């Protein structure tokens, strides 16, 4: 019987190559989504300063994620570690700014028409918390690079929905617009699973935790959004603002109707 010899160095190199390609593809999805809206005239640079700060910080995360994969494949461990500590602080800014922008949009009563305002608030907050949780787990597992990079990819996948949503026909996907973008974001971890199986014959257990956490976040979002807790959150967030007058679980009229 012939034996199969697995070269660990070759396997690791193949692993790093996959994650670099995935990071490039994810960055391109975000860039394409926002560029398309800008070119179509549906986005502009006249947005409030808070929105610009939010965009810069979230785009900055995609740059950090891409660079970390570049440093990994080029064996630049020193730069990888330094940028990793910057990324740790960056997550705090992302959660803060993401929460502030979500709150500001809801309070102004300007939630886009294919999302229900109450659902929008909940998936904005819960998604950020799960992103932060997966990122913290990835940082804690930084000495186990196989876990580290897979958890990071799942965490960053949770940020892709806004970019993906700008590429999809969101008005046609109502009332499942959010769920559609979430399902699309799962494509990257799913490709990671298939890539593992192709290279190693089995999927790494980190995918179960990462993808499992993403699915738990979706179930939690749906349970909270359409229950008493979602109503209480919406009332608290929009109290004393124009958003309080907006029906929490109704879609705004479509500008195309």
Image (tube, helix red, strand yellow):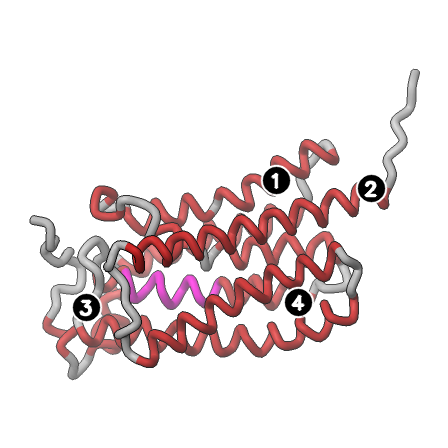
Badge number at residue 193: 1
Give the residue displayed 82% in from the left and 41% down from the top.
10
Q: Earlier in the sequence, mark 3 or mark 1?
A: 3
Residue 178 spot, x, y in % from top left: 32, 51
Q: Nearer the viewer, mark 4 or mark 3?
A: 3
Q: Main secondary structure of the magenta part?
A: helix
Identify the magenta region.
Answer: 120-130
Q: Which residue is mark 4?
A: 139
Q: Earlier in the sequence, mark 4 or mark 3?
A: 3
Residue 212 spot, x, y in % from top left: 53, 49
**Residue toward you, 94 or 166:** 166
Furthest-front residue in this view: 39
Q: Which residue is mark 3?
A: 110
Give the distance between the C-alpha atoms of the residues marked 3 and 1, in whole angstroms: 38 Å
- Under circle 1, the secondary element is helix
Horizontal side, residue 255 vs residue 40: left or right: left
How crowded is the residue under tag 4: few (<14 C-alpha within 10 Å), some, or many (20+)? many
Q: Earlier in the sequence, mark 4 or mark 1?
A: 4
User: Magenta segment: does it hold 124?
Assistant: yes
Q: Which residue is mark 2?
A: 10
Q: Nearer the viewer, mark 4 or mark 2?
A: 2
**Residue toward you, 225 or 207:** 207
Horizontal side, residue 134 vs residue 53: left or right: right
């Amino acid at each position: 019987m012939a034996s199969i010899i697995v070269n660990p160095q070759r396997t690791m190199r193949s692993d790093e190559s996959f994650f670099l390609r995935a990071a490039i593809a994810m960055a391109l999805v975000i860039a394409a989504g926002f560029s398309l809206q800008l070119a179509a005239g549906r986005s502009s640079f006249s947005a409030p300063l808070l929105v610009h700060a939010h965009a810069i910080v979230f785009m900055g995360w995609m740059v950090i994620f891409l660079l970390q994969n570049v440093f990994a494949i080029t064996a630049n461990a020193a730069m990888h570690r330094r940028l990793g500590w910057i990324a740790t602080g960056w997550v705090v800014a992302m959660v803060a700014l993401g929460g502030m922008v979500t709150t500001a949009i809801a309070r102004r009563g300007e939630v886009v028409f294919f999302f229900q305002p109450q659902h929008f608030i909940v998936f904005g907050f819960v998604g950020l918390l799960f992103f932060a949780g997966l990122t913290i787990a990835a940082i804690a597992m930084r000495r186990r690079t196989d876990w580290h990079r897979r958890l990071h990819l799942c965490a960053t996948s949770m940020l892709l929905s806004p970019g993906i949503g700008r590429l999809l026909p969101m008005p046609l996907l109502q009332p499942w617009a959010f769920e559609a973008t979430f399902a699309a974001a799962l494509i990257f971890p799913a490709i990671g699973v298939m890539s593992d199986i192709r290279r190693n014959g089995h999927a790494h257990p980190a995918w179960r935790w990462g993808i499992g956490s993403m699915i738990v976040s979706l179930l939690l979002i749906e349970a909270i959004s359409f229950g008493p807790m979602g109503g209480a959150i919406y009332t608290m967030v929009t109290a004393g603002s124009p958003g309080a007058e907006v029906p929490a679980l109704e879609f705004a009229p479509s500008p195309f109707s």
